[in-house]
Amino acid sequence: MYSAVDRGVWCSEVHRGCQAQFHSHDSVVGVSCLAAMAASNVEGSQHNRAGKEIIMQPPITSEVVVAYAQCPRKAYLLLFGPEQGIPHEYIRILERQRQENHERYVNLLQHNHADVHPYTVENLRNGRSVLLNARLQAEGYEATCSALRRVEGTSSGGTPWYEPTICVGTYSINTDQKRELVFTGYVLAHVQHTPPVAGSMIGVDGRTHTIKLDKSATDLLSLLAPLRAWTTTAAPEPPPIILNKHCPLCPFQRLCHAQAEQEDNLSLLDSLSTAKMVKKYARKGIFTVNQLSYLYRPRKQRKRSRKSVVPRHDVALQALVIRTGKIFILRRPELSRQPVEIFLDIEGIPDQHRYYLMGLFICEGERGTYHAVWADTGAEEEQMWHQFLTLLQEYPDAPLYHYGSYEPKAIATLGHR
Ligand code: SF4
């Protein structure tokens, strides 16, 4: 159940101006209310002097809310940008899977339930058991879900009470998808005057994941506040570009990257991809990669110290490398070669929490042999692991080389399983 605070937070939002929206014939009225409210907030700057024209504000959708948590600039571009960018191929695949999953789920509901109807405000008021393809609109917010399912009891306004169900294009549920469900629950709370306690997500394998919605209300409101400020301001400023780990999948990647290069933006350096770090340098008057490159000072070895200075990653040195186009070697890497060395690569499917390939290159002097052990299904993973161990046991003294941290984590996971 909702804590008193959470319930208070959600309910105060629910009751503010929502009553009129619910009693209207069409929930779109909520959007025009916001437009009118926004227009009045900007003291006439968004409607012409004669007050004849009202500019509609874009609705705050699930996509925008999820985007704000990933990168505020992405949310801004979705809301106010002239174009919607180019979706990444991986995102298109997920969207196709989500759509197929949605169709499967809707078919299943239609076969298994007698009281299934399309979503309309009227069907919701009449308390139908299952409402399909819901587009919920209230207070300038807009969320869609595959179905609303009626739960026991009635809301505080005396109307039937529903919980949202969303279909996703993945096997497991990630934070963005949970956030989408929480936002959908929030908009539904406005529509039915009572916050839903839980919601469901249907994975592509048909599994239902039940998510408690009351826990995340505070997190959601912290995202909605700045979005609300944008949509009620005459000409909101776009957030600065800070390239980050989400950029490779973002539809605006090309646009932002081109602008970042033009600006010689600090976040072009991977390790400066957080607003906090960029601000830290801005306080010192450093705004570009070129400026940063002049900060590099090599660390000196103390004369009497026997310990050699361990090289650490230095962003200023990285910037210097880019400015000069030269390679700097801080210390030659030392590798003690062994008669037998093994190079390891492991591949997995993170969404399904499983590994399907362990590849080894065994180097014995001048001779090298490749070995690949596979698991075509999750059930074969254990067999793959034992084959891998059998191969290793033949070379008990050989060092194992790998790239990055994925392989040690995979070995720890597989060993534990
Ligand atoms: S490309 Fe990166 S910086 Fe630009 S909007 Fe997308 S996530 Fe934000």
Image: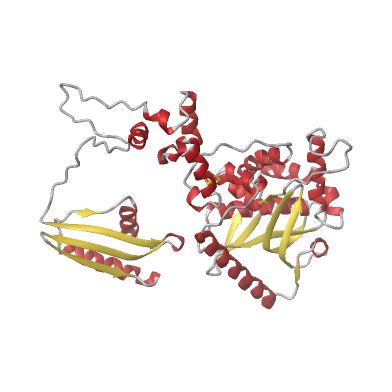
Q: Residue at x 32, y 68 (%)?
A: 382
Q: Position of residue 258 (x, y in %)?
A: 50, 44
Toward the top, the furthest residue is 303
Taking depth in this image into account, of 64 and 113 the one nearest to the observer is 64
Q: Quadrant of residue 127?
A: bottom right
Q: With respect to residue 154, does 141 lie above or below?
A: above
Residue 172 drawn at (x, y percent): 50, 61
Q: Is residue 277 left or right of residue 41?
A: left
Quarter of the image with the C terminus in it: bottom left
Residue shown at 37% from the left, 72% from the top = 376
Taking the image as shown, residue 324 lies to the left or right of residue 36, namely left
Q: Is residue 92 above or below residue 301?
A: below
Q: Quadrant of residue 111?
A: bottom right
Side (left or right) of 170 relative to 219 = left
Q: Residue at x 27, y 68 (%)?
A: 372
Residue 150 seen in render: no
**How many numbered discs sit on the rendered protein?**
0
Q: Is residue 48 visible?
A: yes
In x, y percent, where is residue 265? 47, 36
Name the residue rendered at 60%, 49% in the picture: 66
Residue 381's image quarter? bottom left
